[in-house]
Each structure stands twice: as C-alpha cells, then as structure tokens.
Amino acid sequence: MRKRILLISGILSSFLLISTFIFAREEPPSLFEDFNFQMGETAAEFVTESFEDLFDIFGNYSKLTESQKEDSWNEYKGKYVRWNGIVNYKGLTDDSWNRAGIRHSVDTNVELMFNEDKKRIVKMINKGDRITYTGRLSILFDRNLLFKLEDANIEAINDKTVVELESKREEENAISSQPSYTPEISTDTDLKESPEGEDTLTFESLYKIFGANSSVSQSRKEELWDSYRGKDVEWQGIVNYKGSGGNDWNRIGIRHNVGTNVELRVDEDSKNLIEMIKREDKITYTGKLAKLFGRNLLCSIEDVDIKKIGDKEVAEIEEALALASSPSGSDTDNTADKEVIKEPEIIMEESMVPKVTKKEDIEIIETMDGLIKIPFVELDALFGRNNRMTESQKDKLWKEYKNKYIRWTGEVVSRGKGRVSGIRMAIKHTEGTDVELVFNNDKENLVLDTKKGDKITYTGKLSTRCGYILPYKLDDGNIESVLKEAGTTE
C-alpha cells in the first residue's frame, strides 16, 4: 500500500514539474501578437519633450559629448513625438512626394517621411503652412537638420484639423462628381447673375471642376478647358505674392481659399498699379482665363484689370494720388475734391512726404561711436506694413539708413548656426520676429550664452529693410548686455 502511495505521489510530482516548465518558460511573440501590433492595436509610445527640449540635448549648442548623445538617442529612437512647425519644403516629384522639411528655428530642422496612405494629406500642405504633426524618431543628424521622422502624419494645418479640411473637400468633391462634366452643366450649377442680368463664372465653380480635389481626369480637364479658355471673369481674392522684379515683375499670386490659387499676368501699362498693392490686400480684378494648371494653383489669367483695392475703386485712388502729388492740389475747390483728399490713405501719404523729400526732417542723428539714434518703433513706422508709402518711396528713403549702425533692445526668439547662413538670431520688438541679427563667427560663444526669452541690448548694421513677411536684417551683430529671463528655456 505504501509503495502504491509513493508511486502515485511520484507521478503527480513529475506531472507538476513538467507543467511548471511548460507554462513558465519564456515564449517568443506569437503571430497573433505580431498581427495586433502591425494593425495598430498596440498604442504608439509618445514622448512629452518638445522640439526645443531635444534641440538642447542634440543640437548644435549641446554640451554633451558624442558618446553621451548616442546614449541619450537610444532612449528616444523609435518613439513618437507631436510637434508644431512651419513647412519649409515638400517633395515635388513622384519619387520625393513623401518628404517634407519642417522649420522650428532656422532653416530645416526636421524631415518628415510619409507612408503611401498619407499622400492625400501631403497634397494639402504648402510651404509656409503651420502644421501640427506626429512621427517616429528615426535618424539623428549632427547639423541644423537634426531629426528624421518616419511614419509621419499631419493633424492640423494653419489651426484647422485635417479632419475638418478633408470633410470640406469631400463635400466639394460630392458636388463636382455629377454624372456629366460637360461645360454647360458644370457652369450652370454655380453661375451667379450679375446686376446686368448676365451669368458670371465664380472661382468656386471652376475649382470644383478643375481643382486639385476634382475627380475629373487630367485628360478630361484639358478637353473641358478648351471651352473655358478666353472666358471673361470678375473675381475677388487676396494678394499672396508679387513678382520680385526682373522678368517676373508682372506676376501676382491670388489666394481664394488656401495657398496661391490664381496667377495674374499684368500688362506693361499697369506697372504703376502693381506698386499700389501689397501682400494681403483684398482686390477685385477682371481678366481672361488663360493657362490651366489644375492644381491648388488653378490657372493663370491674362488681360488683367484691377478694379478695386480693398473697398476703394482704383480710379478713385489714382485720382486722389494725382491730386495729392499736384503742387496746388487742384485747380478747383469743390466739395467732391475735398472729400477725396480726406481719404485715410492720402492723409498717411502726405504725412510721409516731408520725410521722403526733406532729409533734414528725418532727423538722422549720429553719435560719437558712429551709431544713429532712432528707436525700432520709429524706424518701423517709416518702413513697416502700416505705412502707405509705395515700395519705390520706401526704397529711396532706405538709402538714408542702409549701412548705418543702431543700438536696440529686444527679446530673443531663437538663435542658430547654419553651414551657409552662419550665426543668426531672431529678435522680437513688437510681435513675432522683427529683426534677424547676423553675427561673425567670433561671436558664437556670445550667442550661445543667450536663451529664448532673454532681453538683450545689441548693435548691428542696417542691411535689408523689412518686407511683407520678412524682418529687418542687420549685419555685424554684437550683444552688449543680456537680461536673463527667469525660468525660460529654448
């Protein structure tokens, strides 16, 4: 009996030992577990650090050694981030469509790599857009381009979520995806009646047929465009850019929804009129449909005539300017003439005339150390957006200030070093970046000791005046004093 009990006990012990070994041993991940991860059921691991946090660790001004950087990178590599930045470029060819460069400080700091399923989202962004994006930290570079992110995605563009933007475009596509796309049917659905009783073609109706989100094939678009080419339009849009000069002075980009949607080609006799308009001006224009692009940039328009700038008729503005520039103002003294002269633009223009024509009135006072005494706000009152002088008048006046040295106090927005661009600092006086200060290489440590939010007193040589979106550029920069901002980080 005892032997039988011992035998049964031995069998049970062996069974328990084998069971423990089977269930306790470490198994490799099953196919099912791998499938779950690939299907996205396992949540991606995000880090909370901002771009600025990681720039301090891995950027040009990091205090870490290469081996320390490598050890730190192992902690972040493969993890996801969610950052905000500015689109600096995106791939234009079939082979590079999935690349986009993002700027956080100076030039491109992050390169995003998108998967095939994000192709539609990539088409929605343009250079200069502010985006919120995610991606997996993949490669660390030791230059201004610091990180490469794979599996990238865009969540918001210019403060609007991609979901909202896609929903809007789907509605537009639903309208445009009618059974037939003949010109007669397409135009009839969105024609508006003019005061004279004639039908006018709207930008929106044309974009639904020929725009980037249209489901019409490119070959079909080209066939349809033959029926629209040369057709007269009268539209209203926002000036997105003007030709910088040379051979492209006559080009004006117009925004109707996002980015540049229409390019105007202006004739030689309208050259003076171009100087009157500025970026972000709302203009009403007429012209003839010329070349089809069929993208976000829909088409070009020729035989352009600008009717209004803002809410004012161009003819009225030209008449007022002619009266303002006349020595006697006008040969007549009727009520209508007085009302024109009292327009706000004319008052601002006249207030600037003495400063343009009389050098002694602009009060350029040089100190013993070769600097000129003029606060930033006074200089910006002459050349900033709110001044209504023409660009040629500003260029003429700028000659009095160019290459003069100034001393100002402002707030550090960012600083960086590029292989080509050198050592630069962005400085805020009113809002955003008002000044770009360029330093010689021997000032690198001086710049390195500053951080975002610091108040600095600096000197520099006035090099380039501000543009529509560009700051003043100052060369030969130097920092004289720094007031540290408690608790700030770059």
Image (cartoon, rainbow, N blue to C red):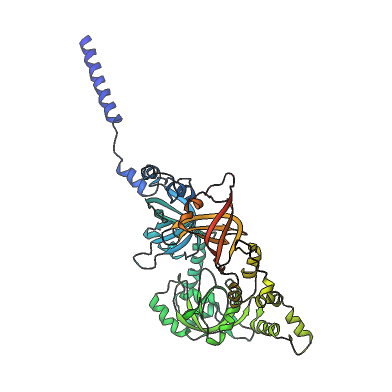
x 65%, y 66%: residue: 365
Residue 182, can we see it?
no
Is residue 389 or residue 288 the one in the foreground? 389
**Spot occupied by residue 153 in the image (x, y as percentages of width and height):** 43, 56
Q: Is residue 67 left or right of residue 242?
A: left
Q: x, y (%) of residue 37?
A: 36, 46
Vertical side of 312 occupied by 101: above or below: above
Q: Nearer the viewer, residue 79 or 74?
A: 74
Which quadrant of the structure image shows residue 418? Answer: bottom left
Looking at the image, the residue that sits furthest to the front is 368
Q: Residue at x 43, y 60 (%)?
A: 101
| Tally of numbered discs | 0
The residue lying at 42 percent from left, 48 percent from top is: 58
Instruction: Using the image as rendered, state which of residue 223 and residue 174 is in the foreground.
Output: 223
In this view of the protein, can residue 208 be seen by the observer? yes
Residue 482 spot, x, y in % from top left: 58, 50
Q: Look at the image and tell me in which quarter the N terminus lies.
A: top left
Q: Is residue 446 left or right of residue 324?
A: left
Which residue reaches farthest top? 2
Q: Position of residue 304 (x, y in %)?
A: 54, 84
Quadrant of res 279: bottom right
- Please identify the quarter of the rendering in which residue 352 is found: bottom right
362 in relation to 48, above or below: below
